[in-house]
Amino acid sequence: MATTTVTKKTPFYDKHVAAGAKMAEFAGYWMPIRYDGDIAEHQRVRTNVGVFDVSHMGEFYVTGDGALDFLQQVTVNDVSKLAVYQAQYSAMCKPDGGIVDDLIVYRYPDKFMLVVNASNMEKDFNWLQSNCPKNVKLENASDRIALLAVQGPNALAVVQSLTKVNVPAIKFYWFAEGELDGVSMTISRTGYTGERGYELYFDEKYADQIWNAVMRAGEKFNIGLAGLGARDTLRLEMKYCLYGNDIDETTHPLEAGLGWITKLNKGEFLGKDVMVKAKAEGLKRKLIGIEVEGKIPARHGYDVLKNGKIIGQVTSGTFSPSLQKAIAMAYVETPYAEKGTALTVNARGRELSAKVIPTPFHNGDPSKD
Amino acid sequence: MNFPENLLYASSHEWAQVSGTEATVGITEYAQSELGDIIFVELPSAGKKVEAGKPFGSIEAVKTVSDLYAPFSGEITAVNEKLKDEPELINKDCYGGGWIVKIKISDMSAKDKLLPAKVYRESIAH
């Protein structure tokens, strides 16, 4: 079957263009890369409040009698621990432990919602479908849902000014359903920035209205936009994994530092046997954080060396606007994963001195009330 | 975007201002906008020989790294030392304070491969 390669637009496309965004194709969508500058947008979110259009993300609804058991089987975290209106970061793995995608599982009174990466949407849906029993129904609602992330220290005030929902009562990785500017939506205390923030899921036909309302409500805080460029530096400072960079089907959650979401004692799930074995034998490599001397960042794909021998690869790297130094994530062989270990990075032929350091790189806590 | 008429442009997004046998070289407004915030410029030292169409340095932005290509063969006669502390000059003023190097041109024929402003503008309009 021929696949279409038409690049899709999110419902906020015209808003981005009007705001002067540099647009680029990302995961099949025209997305804003930056508006007024990567660093300015990054600092806006760290110190004030910024708005991201992340409508490219995929949303799947899972319903039916078998929904909970099904999700226990296909995700690594313990879905039975989720209360209604609670959300959970998780991953889906293949039987060999390779990560199909990382995702957030939301538990509603009558259904679950899975939020997946745009780049994996079709693959994920097919994967879920192929593992889905008869008593579970899957629906891809992605095209109907607009998603805005309002992130930063002033996000609470902006969101609260538009809704009667008691926003401070929504704890980190919990959510509420209610009206915001008169529009029914999910208000979720989640994000990919390391700041306190909210993600608003709503019917895409209200996209213009909600965008305008959020920007108007944020005027007194000097709210501004933030693009995928800032999103990447913000998440990197927190050592949040980016699928396709830091994790993929050749990596398993334990070596990616995602042991905290991988509940090996919850019962059977796809990939468990491989991970139990990997844990028993000891991990061969680990995803670690490094800082690089000087201003040249280590970037995706650069080799990491110890005494001239290649012992790993950089998966993500940038110049950190918050820390004013070059930081990176890298897989290295376990003996070199200890904090303080001196390493070198081959940056296109130039040797950079690097050191394993504790993560997250940025000292922030998005769960703090 | 601004592409001054008095400059020549390479398809690799450098500009050159030729004055006698010397060219001042920088990157275009389009290039700086594609790169985003620039954090480091790797510069050659004065006296270094460069070859038309070959890399002579690189620019590190927050998001990406890009090589700089010499529009002319010749010798580097000056580098913009200010870029060591203020690489963002390229973002702020790519045709002025953000110039990168000066080259003493050894072969003027490379000029024929460079584009006038109008043609360069059309080439980046997709």
Image (cartoon, rainbow, N blue to C red):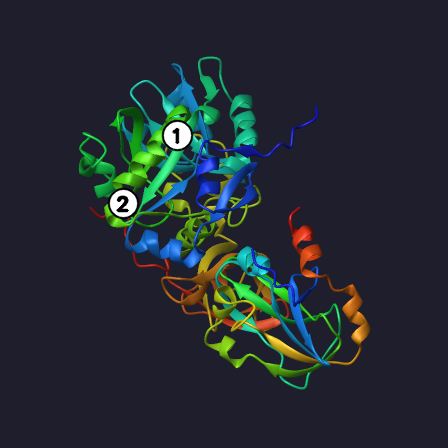
Residue A248 x/y as whole percent: 54, 43
Q: Residue at x 44, y 16 (%)?
A: A136
Mark 1 neighbour density, 10 Å: few (under 14) some (14–19) many (20 or more) = some
Residue annotated with mark 1? A207
Q: Nearer the viewer, residue A11 or A257?
A: A11
* Sequence order check, earlier mark of 1 and 2: 1
- Rendered position, B99 above or below A72: below
The amino acid type found where label 1 is placed reads Ala
Q: Is residue A213 left or right of residue A269?
A: left
Residue at screen point 30% across, 24% down = A183
Where residue A151 appears, as percent x and y from the top left, is: 32, 45
Q: x, y percentage for residue A307?
A: 57, 73
- Specify the quadrant that holds the N terminus of chain A: top right
**What secondary structure is marked by label 1?**
helix
Q: Chain of mark 2?
A: A
Q: Is residue A58 left or right of residue A155?
A: right
Of all residues, the one furthest to the front in this rendering is B5
Please indicate, yes or no, whether residue A272 appears anywhere in the rendered image. Answer: no
Q: Dot 1 falls on which chain?
A: A
